[in-house]
Image (tube, rainbow, N blue to C red):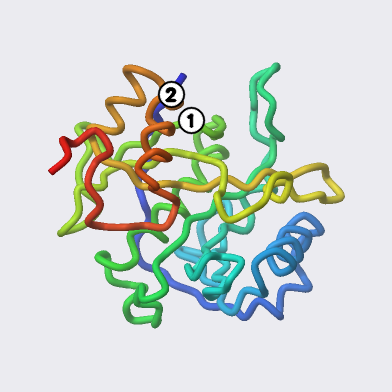
């Protein structure tokens, strides 16, 4: 079953920190950082939008590599400090972090990261990571989050207007769970989707949407101009 959430993405307040200065972070965050470094390569940037707000969420940037299939990987750091109220019987750890992947040519300089057209994935990843603690809820695979009601495109030149939470495609089986001193931390991907895909997930289930996305070779690298998977061919 697909579950919708409503969030507002933050704007402004960009703070940069070098990943190699993170010795002061919690054992959970250090374990996540070590896991990403071992699987995808060491992060080269760490940004935080509105770092004065709680919970503090940082974004780790891992540059393109063979392991990441040539994409920039962005992963939250700090979300897993919160134990989500995952319902009994749901087979996922209560702690998680979120990821998304950007094309290798996505503008990454600090000026561009404050412009809405290029920064919206990062603002939204931050908002999604804060959502469980702020709303006393949980996120997991199959959940959908629209950009408003009705959903509005994230930026000009795209029809993408919501997210589907999925398992990361850049990890082999078992690599999407991090062992930490506080227990396992799951890694999930936030995949941008269209309004018609949001409707499909709500009406027929996220599994049906995911099957169509996989059949169309859609992965979790953001592609602003991709067509909806339920659009007519040709």
Image side of residue 223 versus residue 135, left or right: left
Residue at x 62%, y 74% (from the top left corner): 43
Residue sitting at the far front: 234
Q: Quadrant of residue 46?
A: bottom right
Task: Give the x, y percent position of residue 59.
Answer: 54, 64
* Above or below for 193 versus 62: above
Real-space Cα separation, disc 1 to disc 2, in angstroms: 6 Å
Task: Give the x, y percent position of residue 94.
Answer: 69, 34
Q: Quadrant of residue 78?
A: bottom right
SS class of the residue under badge 2?
A: loop
Image side of residue 181 versus residue 208, left or right: right
Image side of residue 152 versus residue 202, left or right: left
Residue at x 52%, y 71% (from the top left corner): 47
Instruction: Give 99 or 205, whichever is nearer the viewer.
Output: 205
Give yes or no for contact between labels 1 and 2 (Cβ–Cβ under 8 Å). Answer: yes
Task: Give the x, y percent position of residue 92.
Answer: 68, 31
Q: How many marks?
A: 2
Answer few, some or many: residues within 10 Å of disc 2's Cα (few below 14, many 20 plus, some between 14 and 19).
many
Q: Which mark is residue 226?
A: none
Task: Give the x, y percent position of residue 58.
Answer: 57, 63
Look at mark 1 in the image and give the residue it sits on. 142
Look at mark 2 in the image and give the residue it sits on. 2
Mark 1 or mark 2: whose residue is earlier in sequence:
2
């Amino acid at each position: 079953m697909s579950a919708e959430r409503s969030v507002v993405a933050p704007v402004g307040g960009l703070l940069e920190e070098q990943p190699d200065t993170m010795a002061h972070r919690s054992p959970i965050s250090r374990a996540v950082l070590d896991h990403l470094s071992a699987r995808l390569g060491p992060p080269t940037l760490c940004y935080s939008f509105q770092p004065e707000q709680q919970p503090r969420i940082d974004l780790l940037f891992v540059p393109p590599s063979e392991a990441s299939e040539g994409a920039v990987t962005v992963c939250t750091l700090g979300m897993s400090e919160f134990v989500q109220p995952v319902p009994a019987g749901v087979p996922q750890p209560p702690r998680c972090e979120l990821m998304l992947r950007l094309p290798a040519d996505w503008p990454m300089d600090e000026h561009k990261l404050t412009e809405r057209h290029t920064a919206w994935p990062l603002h939204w990843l931050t908002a999604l990571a804060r959502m469980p603690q702020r709303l006393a809820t949980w996120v997991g695979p199959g959940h959908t989050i629209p950009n408003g009601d009705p959903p509005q495109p994230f930026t000009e030149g795209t029809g993408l207007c919501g997210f589907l939470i999925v398992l990361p495609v850049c990890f082999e089986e078992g690599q999407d769970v991090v062992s930490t001193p506080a227990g396992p931390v799951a890694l999930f991907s936030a995949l941008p989707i269209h309004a018609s895909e949001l409707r499909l997930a709500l009406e027929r289930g996220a599994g049906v949407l995911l099957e169509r996305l996989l059949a169309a070779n859609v992965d979790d690298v953001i592609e602003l101009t991709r067509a909806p998977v339920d659009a007519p061919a040709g």
